[in-house]
Image (cartoon, rainbow, N blue to C red):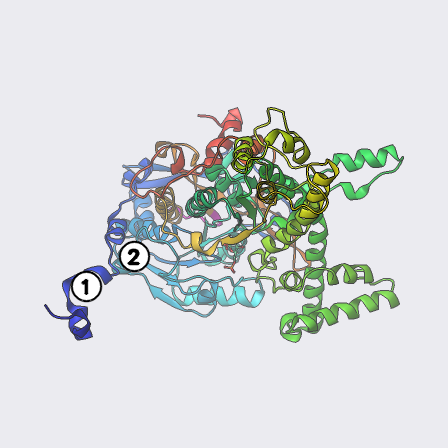
Amino acid sequence: MTNPKAIDPEVLLNHPTVKLTTTSNTSALQERLRFKPEICDVFKHACTRLEDDLRYEFQIHPTAKEKLPDIIHNAVQRVTGVDSVDEKFLRGFKKERRIGIVFSGGPAPGGHNVIAGLFDAMKAANPNSRLFGFILGPDGILENEVIELTAEMVDAHRNLGGFSMIKTGRTKIDSEKKMRLARENCKKRGIDALVIVGGDDSNTNAAFLAQELYHDNIQVIGVPKTIDGDIQVRDKNSNVLCAISFGFHTAARAFAQNISNLCNDCSSDVKYWHVCKVMGRVASHLGLEVALQVHPNIILIGEELADYIDVDRIEKAKKQGSIDYTAYGMTLRNLSRIICDGIVRRAAVGKNYGVIIIPEGILEFINEIQVFIIKLNTIIAEYNQTHDTDFHSDFVTLEDKLDYLRRLARLSREDKTFSVWNTRDDDLFNDIPAFFQEGLLTERDSHGNFQFSQVQTEEVIMGLVTDYLKILQERGEYKIGIKPDWYKKTLEKEGLNPGTYGPLLFANYGTNDPFLQVKNSIVSIKTLTQELVRSGVIRDADAVPAAILKVFQASVPKFKTQNHFYGYDGRGNDPSWFDCTYAYNLGLTVFSLIANQATGQMAAIKNLEKGFPHWEPMGIPIAPLMHLEDRKGKLELVLERALVDVESPAFKVVKALRKKWLAANAGPDDYRNPGPIHLLSENGADSRPLTLALNDLDRPNTDKD
Ligand code: FBP
């Protein structure tokens, strides 16, 4: 037999087994490329038409009316399927078109299917129509970097994750110059319609471009993309028009699968708390969804913290005849106390392990941090504006930035009208760890958003937790509960009487509690020895019996954590059945909107919370959804982001089940394993976001079918 080590590498690489095992054309990939998403019934007809649906109304902001006059009066448009239409309509529907598409912002699973759906519908209407992809996001529009998307390219990306076909970027088309460039380049390319696949900021861009290009007869259509789940559209009567963006489901499922594995791991080796930061920018939708899927021991939801009131402190102050204003709103300190409470309670029942989920944007809801974020946003924006330069290029190191802030604090002492950064701000800021200072000073994105993904939120929070747990341990309040049987066995093995030592060691000896709690006064071998000497079971010079020492040591917790960040991995996952089907039908909807002359609309599918047969493709007007928001220190007209509604059924369910999931009892943990992501079929409750199914429970009756 030939010695495998002696085989020439060239020969080895040509061996059939090597070829089979190293091919990137895996069977999973082939299965994905072959998969054909189901299409909504309306798309099974020869053509589609749009019908204005006047049941849905919006509260229009006057600034939106002023800035977007040609698209502000757009109505919700339902896509309907038709088989016989007049010649003129047919000509318009099937006319030869040049459509441009661009991805904007972070990748989200399903993007390639939007392209595939649009491509298929466009080619079915007219094989001569052409689809162009702007490369690397909106920069592709500004720099006229375009590729024509061919059938081969589209086929090679069907049902696959990422945005690799045309890439993406975060540039904002936000100046007159950029608008002009965008218009010129679209005209140069002969683009009839531009499709912007993006989040709230990108759909905002879509509305402004739709207005800008309105009189050039270039249509602009938005598509709701983002794993964050913060594009949710309701009309003014709370009717849900777009329950979620594409990408959310897959990302949540991918995170959930990994976190569920951690639940398995930690309940096996029972020594780690796994701290899982979950992406989602400001809103905690992903955290909420993942929690519903895996039942972690502790789940924090940012939106809930904003309304936090420390009742005990208010009562205490009231008794002293004063008001404690610091009791309103969550502080990092309070938050760490809440986490510690859960950890301590689990330890008391022998569970010194667990899983915590922390949404990445949680700091936005913590008063003291939010103040820093807003102040630093303003300082950076003002600096850039005044000096017509970039703060981060001028102050490269953290020390440079801190030095600049120090100068501002000095200025505030000299000039009382300057108040954005005073000595107190500077002192408080200097109290926080350098890595966190760096995080708070990190560069804002092109839309002026604070980049939460760049901040080690979990380290900040868990640092405080670790410190406070040490205090609790010194006070004897953080300790591991001891099983009575084990205690008895351990002592008897050494010939000691458990009944003699039990009342000396434990605060609850002789009760029916399933776990024995070492007395709070016994926090070290020294205090243990003192207790035994005092009660006369050993003499001063005697050593503590080994069995007693063993029991005491078993009660001493070691707090060990493993930090994880779930974000970029789930964002790049191949899409679930839900996202494949949703995104593909969004692509079909986009074509329907274009072929029916719509502009300034966002493609959407209504009834996502229900089974596929209920899905209704539609166009939602973007302009009426806009409101004014502080961005880079000034008010801008943007699409409103949806935060977690603490009155929603999904949140209430999580709140009500928190105690069960903490499982601070003698029973087993309540972890849930959602299993792997499915591609091939709709499969029970897990085939769409659980939050959608739950939030459907309080839909207004007027909109029920
Ligand atoms: P989009 O809103 O553009 O979809 O991006 C979402 C997101 O994944 C956030 O969850 C995260 O905070 C951010 O992008 C990370 O940004 P970046 O890709 O620039 O690191």
Q: Position of residue 432 (x, y in %)?
A: 70, 59
121 horizontally vs 303: left or right: left
Position of 219 relative to 136 (above/below): above
Which span of residues is magenta-colored? 596-601
Q: Is residue 429 magenta?
A: no
Residue at image position (49%, 44%) is 270
Q: Split into 4 quadrants, where in the image is the C terminus?
A: top left
Q: Comparing marks 1 and 2, which lies closer to the viewer?
A: 1
- The disc, 1 or 2, on the residue closer to the chain's N-terminal end is 1
Q: Position of residue 436 (x, y in %)?
A: 65, 60
Amino acid type, label 2:
Val
Question: Which part of the image, by quadrant, shows the N terminus?
Answer: bottom left
Seen at 39% across and 48% down, the residue is 590
State the residue position of label 1.
Answer: 19
Q: Which residue is mark 2?
A: 154
Residue 479 locus on image (x, y percent): 63, 41
Residue type highlighted by circle 1? Lys
Residue drawn 31% across and 56% down?
157
Q: Rounded to the nearest whole Å, what is the CA distance between mark 1 and mark 2?
A: 26 Å
Mark 1, Cα crowd under 10 Å, few <14 / some 14-19 / many 20+, is: few
Q: Which mark is residue 575?
A: none
As drawn, which residue projects farthest toward the left?
1
Task: Give the x, y percent position of residue 592.
Answer: 37, 45
Question: Is 346 placed above or below 386 here?
Answer: above
Image-based side of 581 in relation to 31, left or right: right
